[in-house]
Image (cartoon, helix red, strand yellow):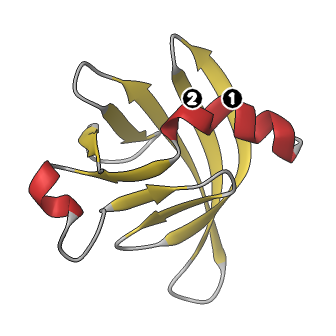
Amino acid sequence: VAKSETSASIESLIGGWATNAESCTAPGPSVTLTASRLETMEQSCEISDVIDGGQGSVTMGLSCGASDGGVDAQLVKLSPTATGIDMTVVGGDSGPQSLVRCP
């Protein structure tokens, strides 16, 4: 996917996100999304692909640094909600994580 397509697909989601407004300030947003990266407290990932899921949702292919020095590939789905977004690791063990936008 060309960077311009990636940017257009996730443009409205770019910014800082956290599980609640209080988490936005200390030590900072739990999740930061740019046009090319998804950063969490646990890992830093490059966005390799973005698939528009319709109705504002996207699925992103990520390449994340692994603890052994390798690279882990992940799929993450972002879906809009009334209060923010739900972030789900496709094929992961846990359900969606609800996030609110940080100011």
| Depth order, front residue of 64/6 | 6
Of the image marks 1 and 2, the number of the one nearer the N terminus: 1
In this view, which residue lies farthest toward the left? 22
The kind of secondary structure element at disc 2 is strand
The residue under label 2 is 58
Crowd band around label 1 with a 10 angstrom C-alpha radius: few (<14), some (14–19), many (20+):
some
The span from disc 1 to disc 2 (Cα, nearest Å) is: 6 Å
x, y percent for residue 74:
57, 53
Q: Where is residue 23 shown, x and y percent of the image?
A: 16, 61
- Residue drawn at (31%, 48%), measured in percent from left and top? 93
Q: Are marks 1 and 2 in contact (CB under 8 Å)?
A: yes
Q: Which mark is residue 27?
A: none
Q: Is residue 67 above or below residue 25?
A: below
Residue corresponding to mark 1: 51
**Residue 26 in the image: above or below residue 11:** below
Q: Amino acid at mark 1?
A: Ile
* Element carrying mark 1: strand
Residue 70: quadrant of the picture: bottom right
Left or right: residue 92 versus residue 5 is left
> Which residue extends farthest right?
2
Residue at 17%, 73% (x, y): give it: 26
Name the kind of residue labelled 2 in the image.
Val
Q: Is residue 98 above or below residue 71?
A: above
Image location of residue 88, percent across then percent down: 38, 39
Where residue 1 sits, quadrant-wise, is top right
